[in-house]
């Protein structure tokens, strides 16, 4: 028997995610009570992603979380035991999947993927090789529209975050002049000093507006924009978009505090700049590019091993920290990829 601690959704959020709407409970899981096609996983680490907040609304693109259900989260862990029909996994294997905000996951084996990269920390499956992070950044940069080119100016919003920091580095690798948008001097310093971006715009600046900083940092306009924020940030870049410029809509974290499927999104009021300048704007979901992901994984690993690509990890310890870690995504205070180290506080068997 194992004791599982899990976070469930007890009420719908109203605005920015509030940890108070989540409830931590404990349940007993009998290892001998698995269905023939189930596997029990002891979770090591969980990925904290913005899409989790969107699933808490009553209607959601990725599927809505029912009240009382475990809050979703990607993670990896070690196989504890398997059902009688499971032959693809064995005790001790490291697996990746949608495991939920909990310490143990009992799930159908078909939803799990075995970690098959020897000598590589499995945490990479939640970062550079994660569907929600590195692979999303790669697909948006190279497969959606025309990639940034040498001599062009590329701008990335939320550039100090998980997806943004990878997308910004990929644009730099492509030879473009890269300008990041982030909040605060500390994050801007990180982008310039550590990620080697050409410039950074501080949207929290009290001295200059975002529009003023864009004109200074991008005097020749913007050729490529990787957008993770939406709202007024997207509008500001539209005003500076060049003829034949490309805008890639990855996400809109500025809009994740309401119901995205109820018409409450602040859309781009300057969208006619696309027509005036012959520019284009395209959105995507990484799941629409599944056939391209093996190639993306190869190049991400290649850039990593050559020292051209990295991802900073912000780690919170213990399953108890999951709700506050999720809240940090929307209020700031972290840089890079947010991870919860579940194993640091996991409860052992009875």
Image (spheres, rainbow, N blue to C red):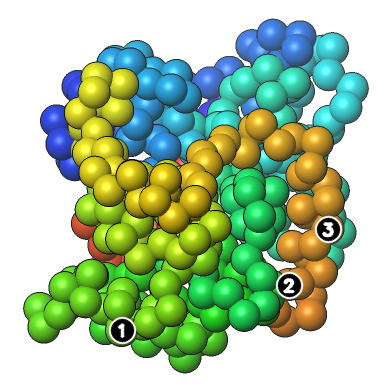
Residue 227: percent from the left, percent from the top?
43, 54
Left or right? Give the position of 266 relative to 108: left
Left or right? Give the position of 13 relative to 26: left
Instruction: Name the image quarter holding residue 147.
Output: bottom right
Q: Residues within 10 Å of mark 3 (few under 14, many from 20)?
A: few
Kind of element beneath mark 3: helix
User: What is the residue that sits farthest to the bottom in this orientation?
Assistant: 193
Cα distance, mark 3 to mark 2? Answer: 10 Å
User: What is the residue that sits farthest to the front in this orientation?
Assistant: 276
Name the residue carrying label 3: 298
Q: Earlier in the sequence, mark 1 or mark 3?
A: 1
Give the answer, above or below, for where 259 lies relative to 152. above
Residue 36: percent from the left, percent from the top?
76, 9
Q: Nearer the viewer, residue 200 or 69?
A: 200
Quadrant including the N terminus: top right
User: What is the residue that sits farthest to the right in this orientation?
Assistant: 87
- Total numbered circles: 3
Instruction: Name the image quarter holding residue 268.
Output: top left
User: What is the residue that sits farthest to the left in this orientation?
Assistant: 206
Cα distance, mark 1 to mark 2? Answer: 32 Å
**Contact flag, marks 3 and 2 (Cβ < 8 Å):** no
Q: Residues within 10 Å of mark 1 (few under 14, many from 20)?
A: few
Name the residue carrying label 1: 216
What residue do we see at 28% from left, 53% from top?
Answer: 235
């Amino acid at each position: 028997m194992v004791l599982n601690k899990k976070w469930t959704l007890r009420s719908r959020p109203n605005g920015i995610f509030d940890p108070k709407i989540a409830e931590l409970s404990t349940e007993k899981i009998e290892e001998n009570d698995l269905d023939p096609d189930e596997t029990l996983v002891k979770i090591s680490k969980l990925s904290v992603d913005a899409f989790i907040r969107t699933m808490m609304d009553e209607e959601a693109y990725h599927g809505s979380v029912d009240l009382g259900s475990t809050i979703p989260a990607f993670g990896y862990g070690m196989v504890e035991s398997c059902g009688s029909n499971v032959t693809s996994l064995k005790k001790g294997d490291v697996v990746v999947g949608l495991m939920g905000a909990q310490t143990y996951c009992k799930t159908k084996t078909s939803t799990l993927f075995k970690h098959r990269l020897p000598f590589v920390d499995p945490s990479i499956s939640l970062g550079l090789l994660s569907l929600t992070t590195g692979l999303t950044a790669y697909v948006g940069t190279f497969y959606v529209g025309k990639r940034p080119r040498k001599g062009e100016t590329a701008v990335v919003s939320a550039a100090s975050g998980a997806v943004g920091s990878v997308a910004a580095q990929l644009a730099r690798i492509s030879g473009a002049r890269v300008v990041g948008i982030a909040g605060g001097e500390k994050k801007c310093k990180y982008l310039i000093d550590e990620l080697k971006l050409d410039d950074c715009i501080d949207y929290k600046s009290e001295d200059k507006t975002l529009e003023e900083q864009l004109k200074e940092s991008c005097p020749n306009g913007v050729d490529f924009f990787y957008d993770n924020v939406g709202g007024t940030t997207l509008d500001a870049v539209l005003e500076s978009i060049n003829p034949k410029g490309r805008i890639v809509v990855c996400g809109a974290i500025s809009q994740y505090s309401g119901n995205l499927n109820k018409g409450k999104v602040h859309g781009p009021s300057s969208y006619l700049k696309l027509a005036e300048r012959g520019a284009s704007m395209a959105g995507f979901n990484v799941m629409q590019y599944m056939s391209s992901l093996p190639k993306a994984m190869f190049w991400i690993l290649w850039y990593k091993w050559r020292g051209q690509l990295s991802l900073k990890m912000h780690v919170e310890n213990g399953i108890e920290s999951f709700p506050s870690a999720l809240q940090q995504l929307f209020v700031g205070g972290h840089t890079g990829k947010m991870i919860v180290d579940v194993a640091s506080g996991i409860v052992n068997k009875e």
